[in-house]
Image: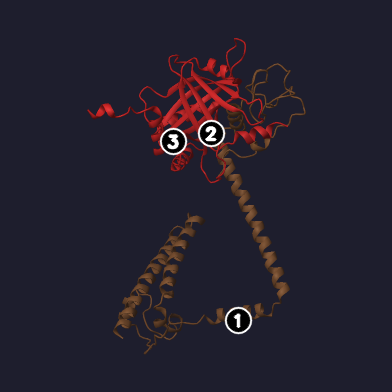
Amino acid sequence: MSAINVAPITATDSLSQALKANIIPNQEYLLQGSVLDSAVEVLLHRLRGLCDNVDAGPETFDDQEVCFSLRDPNQQAAPLMLRVRKALDARDMPYQLRYIGQPDLGDKNRPTVVRSSLDIACSGMLIEFLNELGCRIEFEYSVKGYMFRKGRMKITVAKVFKISQSSMPPEPISQSYLVELSVLAPQGQDAIGEDMRAFADQLRPLVQLDKIDYKRLGHMAVT
Amino acid sequence: MQREEKQLEATLHAILNRVNDLKTAIQALITKLETEYETINWPSFLDNYAILSGHLTGLSKILQAELAPSLRSVVVLPLQLGCERDEELSRLTEGRVPACTHDLVPDLLRTKLEPQAEQRLQQLIHKASTLNYDTAQKQVAQFTKVISHVWEIISKGREDWEGESMRSAGMQPTHSIADTHALVTAVGTGKGLRPGMPPCVPSGVVPPGIGPSRGPTPQMGTAAPNMPKAPSAIKTNIKAANQIHPYQR
């Protein structure tokens, strides 16, 4: 009888509850590195040994990522960047819309890059929707490689390809594979950074996983 | 009184143990020298010396402990010297000291240095006290120079040896920092991925972002170390990153 008088739990209620309890994984802890094509087999073997066991061998993925930017024509502020990722090898999977924030550069002693990251699964209408909102395509690329897990940590070893306009096959932009070690966690769980650093040390000297500030690198290379 | 006696006894016991260890080590060294003098090599000889020095350190540690003052007040006096063979003494000393004669006792119960050593020490102390400050400084500087020279020779030698062993193992760098930077900037900011840009070429060159490079048609990303058609106005600063050795020990 009392169930009739109880109001249904709304989405905003559960969202605010989750926010209060700090369980929403909205921070990404990240370490990046690369490995030459000649050494990638060795790295895959080592990761297969170190990471959680998967029966069918390392999981492969083939994704295409498009980066949109939403500029405010009045303000000169930095545009909002949104990334859309779709799986080329599994067409039924939803599109992933991702917002990545600025990395938190304050603390030099932090072992990893920490940036806010929000992921949402969407349908295929996403691209149209973003175009309607006024977002423009900045750049796009495809990544193809392997994914490993160790506990909460995700390790990807992937080759980045530039998508050419004509029907030519995508060409790699480098002779190396990009290696990324990331964890999605709620705010405040900085201890995971130490675990990530310890794991990264196990991959040395094959790969040097480090905090890399690409914004600074981007500014350096352009005169 | 009794406590002090007990302490003394315990200290003596400990000293005796250490001295016995030292004796065994010296004996072993002498045996080694006598039997293996043709096949012995410097490192194993030094190992024996290290054992000896370890024992000596242990002994000096005991002597430096708080019980040493009580030992200072204790004196060993020979009460009787004799020329005839003493069975008890020779048994205690494993046949080395057959009799408490007057020529062995000064050496065995010595507390000051030998007369020759004492004279040499006096000479050196006198020389040091008459040295004036400037000459002393110069001598110290020369000494430091010689030592650092020797150090350089040794470290160069070591580098050569280790470099050779590393090269013979054939270890190649398995990751390139330039590539890391290129990939991360490409994924993060889209460098080299925008339409109309020449593709990124690895090992030291990051393609320019916007501007003067629009025009040349995209070239195939081969492993060419230079970008042949890039305008000279574009500087690449990633070369500095290449100087970081992949193995940072």
Image position, residue B131 (x, y; %): 69, 77
Picture quadrant where residue B62 is located:
bottom left
Q: Which residue is mark 2?
A: A32
Residue in the picture at 69% in, 69% down: B139
Q: Amino acid at mark 1?
A: Gln
Q: Which residue is mark 3?
A: A185
Are the residues at dot 1 and dot 3 in contact (C-beta closer than 8 Å)?
no
Image position, residue B33 (x, y; %): 46, 61
Q: How would you rate the neighbour count of disc 3 (Cα within 10 Å): few for under 14, some for 14-19, many for 20 or more? A: many
Image position, residue B155 (x, y; %): 61, 51
Chain painted red: A
3D distance between C-alphas at marks 3 and 2: 17 Å
Q: How would you rate the neighbour count of disc 2 (Cα within 10 Å): few for under 14, some for 14-19, many for 20 or more? A: many
SS of the residue under disc 2:
strand
Residue A2 left/right relative to A78: left
3D distance between C-alphas at marks 2 and 1: 68 Å
Residue B99 vs residue A59, the one in the foreground: A59
3D distance between C-alphas at marks 1 and 3: 75 Å
Most distant residue in the bottom direction: B79
Q: Dot 2 falls on which chain? A: A
SS of the residue under disc 3:
strand
Viewer-side label of 3, 2: 3
Chain B tint as drawn: brown
Of callouts 3 and 2, the N-terminal one: 2
